[in-house]
Amino acid sequence: MEGKARLSKVMAQRDMCSRREADLLIEKGFVLVNGQTAQLGDKVFFEDVIEVLPEGLRLLSQKQTVILNKPVGYTSHLSDRGYKTAQSLIIKQNQWRGDSQKWKPLKRTELAPAGRLDIDSKGLLILTQNGVLARRIIDSRYGIEKEYLVWFKGELNSEKIKKMELGQLKLNGQFLKPVKVFVCEKQMVRLILVEGKKRQIRRMFKLLGLRVVSLKRIRVGPIVLGSLKEGQWRYLTPKEEAQLIKAMPRKGIKENI
């Protein structure tokens, strides 16, 4: 029998919710362990029976996820003080007219980016209150593809493409995962990655003697940017969320508790 771990950590490992959400549910008395009301800081065995009461499930079901076409000049993280935030664009006036869901007031400070899109880049940004969904999109072990259009200066030859495709480039002393490269024009490519290290594409191109002049994300898993104009957003539909979860392979993924 393995040792004990914090209840909130085990709940996150089981994809019941994020650790922060687990602490909130525990604090409100909405979590049972082996039939007993749990307390903050409790530790459990991984095989213990953990149950979220209906009140807690209703709380989790209210989590919202939106898709934004982020313009250049907006940061995706609220912690980047002094800059305009992507979250500030999530207002009624910017909602896509073709959205199937009506506007509902959102706590924008609770919308976390499911993967960074730096201030100099534009395109698809998923903002969510769902900690489990965000973690799965960000974690490269789940293999969620991120697709980009990249305009650059410099000469991109077959040798440089091979280095990206075979995962022969290093950042911070670690090899990057292989990247799918599709040449669109002489100085424009389409890239598909399964990881998202800070400013990865720009740093990767710099290693190859190239300079990125414009970068646009157009897809995350099955979610595409579509007809959203810059600055516009829409709600992620339940069908899209189900497709996103389905695209995340669980087999072979082990997380230490």
Image (cartoon, rainbow, N blue to C red):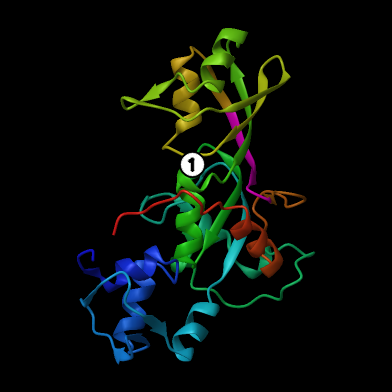
- Magenta part of the chain: 214-222
Q: Which residue is mark 1?
A: 119
Q: Quadrant of residue 96?
A: bottom right
Left or right side of 100 for 32: left
Amino acid on which disc 1 is placed? Ile
Say which residue appears at 49% left-offset and 55% top-offset: 136
Q: Is residue 155 shown to the viewer in this render?
A: no
Residue at position x 68%, y 50% from top?
222
**Residue 234 vertical position relative to residue 171 in the rendered view, above or below:** below
Location of residue 83 in the rendering, given as x and y in whole percent from the top left corner: 43, 49
As drawn, 237 above or below 126: below
Q: Which one is nearer the viewer's eye here, 9 or 124?
A: 9
Report which quarter residue 64 is drawn in.
bottom right
Seen in the image, is 43 located left or right of residue 78? left
Q: Is residue 256 above or below residue 149?
A: below
Task: Check residue 160 for magenta coloring.
Answer: no
Give the prevailing secondary structure in the magenta stretch.
Answer: strand
- Residue at x-position 75% and y-position 66%: 99
- Would residue 182 be found to the left or right of residue 75 on screen? right
**Image position of 29 (left or right of 129):** left
In which quadrant is the C terminus drawn? bottom left
Q: Give coordinates of residue 180: x percent, y percent.
A: 61, 28
Question: Per the image, is 220 magenta?
Answer: yes
- Between residue 233 and residue 143, name the one nearer to us: 143
In the picture as drawn, the residue positioned furthest to the front comes out as: 1
Image coordinates for residue 154, horizontal then vertical, percent? 58, 11
Q: How many marks?
A: 1
